[in-house]
Image: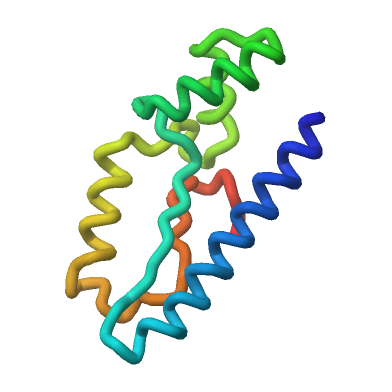
């Protein structure tokens, strides 16, 4: 089951990245940049709690064990906080990132290789 779930997540991620590139190709001539953000997981969000209830519960993990597992897969041994992801979104929307379009920014802290 875990392998299937990873395959679905990988396929979904690939589809989102392809959509980001396609939208960028279509919208860039109109001055619109398209950039995706790919965080590893943000424990502060309700979605993470919902996922934990589904996956962690079926694996017999507590919330702390589940978030610890997520952190253990990152090079930094932690996941990004919600405000860190928000800061990156603000930066990517700014003129300082004006050269970025048609790509996905990897915010997994090394958990997912590009």
Position in image of residue 30 (x %, y %): 29, 88
Residue at image coords 62%, 17%:
56
Q: Relative to the observer, which residue lies in front, 96 or 15?
A: 15
Residue visible at 80% across and 37% down in the picture: 3
Q: Quadrant of the N terminus?
A: top right
Residue 23 vertical placement versus 73 (above, below): below
Give the total number of marks visible in the rendering.
0
Q: Pick the quarter of the image with the C terminus.
A: bottom right
Q: Position of residue 76 (x, y in %)?
A: 46, 38
User: In the image, what residue occupies the spot 28% across and 55% down?
Assistant: 89
- Quadrant position of residue 28: bottom left
Q: Is residue 91 above or below residue 10?
A: below
Q: Residue at coordinates 31% horizontally, 80% vertically from top-left? A: 99
Where does the image place residue 67, in percent across and percent down from the top left?
50, 22
Image quarter of residue 13: bottom right
Of all residues shown, which one is farthest toward the left? 95
Task: Describe residue 10's horizontal placement relative to residue 35 as left or right.
Answer: right
In front of the other: 80 or 45? 45
* Above-or-below relation of 24 to 70: below
Residue, far bottom:
29
Q: Nearer the viewer, residue 43 or 19?
A: 19
Residue 27 lies in what quarter of the image? bottom left
Q: How is the image coloured?
A: rainbow
Q: Position of residue 78 (x, y in %)?
A: 45, 32
Q: Is residue 25 left or right of residue 100?
A: right
């Amino acid at each position: 089951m875990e392998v299937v779930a990873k395959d679905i997540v990988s396929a979904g991620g690939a589809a989102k990245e392809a959509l980001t590139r396609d939208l960028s190709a279509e919208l860039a001539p109109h001055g619109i940049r398209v950039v995706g953000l790919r965080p590893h997981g943000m424990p502060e969000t309700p979605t993470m709690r919902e996922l934990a209830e589904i996956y962690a519960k079926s694996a017999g993990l507590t919330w702390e064990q589940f978030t610890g597992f997520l952190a253990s897969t990152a090079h930094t041994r932690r996941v990004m906080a919600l405000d860190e992801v928000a800061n990156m979104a603000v930066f990517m929307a700014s003129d300082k990132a004006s050269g970025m379009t048609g790509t996905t920014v990897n915010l997994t802290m090394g958990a997912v290789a590009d």
